[in-house]
Amino acid sequence: AIQMTQSPSSLSASVGDRVTITCRASQGIRDDLGWHQQKPGRAPKLLIYSASTLQSGVPSRFSGSGSGTDFTLTISSLQPEDFATYYCLQDYEYPRTFGQGTKVELK
Amino acid sequence: EVQLLESGGGLVQPGGSLRLSCAGSGFTFSNYAMSWVRQAPGKGLEWVSTISGSGDNGDSTYYADSVRGRLTISRDNSKSTLYLQMNSLRAEDTAIYYCARDFGDSGYYPIDHWGQGTLVTVSS
C-alpha cells in the first residue's frame, strides 16, 4: 500500500499567518491527491482535488501544489474558521490511503 | 444540493453484525462511485471500501485489508442507497463511519462529498 506521510503533525499559528502543510507519497501518484479539512465533531470537507484544483465554494486563500511524490497545501492568510485538522488522501490506486493528519491550532 | 445521510450505527457485541445505510439525494445516485471511510475515536481517517457506479457496471468493489472478508459494500440504485454489511465485528471496528461520494463512476475519482457519519461501537 502507498504510505502518505504528512508533516507537521501539528502546528500553532496566528490569524493572518501563511501556513504550509506537506504530504509525501511512498511512490509516485501523479496528481491523484486531495486535501480534506475536518473541524472537531464535524464531517470532513473537500478543499482541493487533483493536487491543485480548488473545490467549488472553497476560499481562494487555500491552494495546493505538487505532483509525483511531494505535495503541499497552503493557506495564504489563516482565518479563525481555518483552525482544524487537514488530511491528504491519495486516490491513485487501491487501497486509498490518508495521511495521518495535521492539526492547525491557535498560537 | 448533494446530501448523504447515514443510519444504522449502534452498540454491538464482538462477533456480531450490523448493517449501515447511506441515503443519497440531490444527484443521480447511480452515476457515482460511493465509499465508506471510518474514524476511530481520537484517530485519523481510514478508507474502508468503494463501489463503482452504473457507468462501470456497478460491480467493482474495493476493500481495505483490515475489513476484507468481514465487511461488504453494496448499493441499491433504485433506492439511492449505499450499504455496508458488517459481520464478525471486533473492538477495533469501533468508529464513526462516513459515507462519501466520488466525483465520477469508475472508482478512480476523488471523494467530493461526505455524509455526517454514524457511530458504531463494538463492545461487550
Image: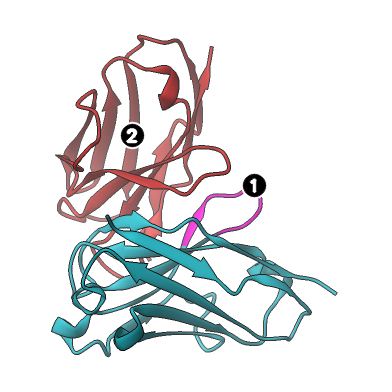
Chain colours: A red, B cyan
**Residue B90 spot, x, y in % from top left:** 70, 76
What kind of element bears circle 1?
A: loop
Q: Residue at x 14, y 82 (%)?
A: B55
Q: Residue at x 72, y 86 (%)?
A: B16
Contact (CB < 8 A) between labels 1 and 2?
Answer: no
Tell me the amino acid under the disc marked 2: Thr
- Prevailing secondary structure of the magenta residues: loop
Relative height, residue B99 to residue B52 (above, below): above
From which residue to which does the magenta span run?
Answer: B39-46
Q: Residue at x 19, y 74 (%)?
A: B105
Q: Which residue is mark 1?
A: B42
Of residue B15 and residue A26, the one placed in the foreground of this image is: B15
Tell me the amino acid under the disc marked 1: Gly
The question of residue B112 being in magenta is answered with: no
**Residue A21 spot, x, y in % from top left:** 35, 30
Q: Within 10 Å of the Cα at label 1, are there few (<14), some (14-19), or many (20+) other Cα atoms?
A: few
Look at the image and tell me in which quarter the N terminus of chain B lies: bottom left
Q: Which residue is mark 2?
A: A22
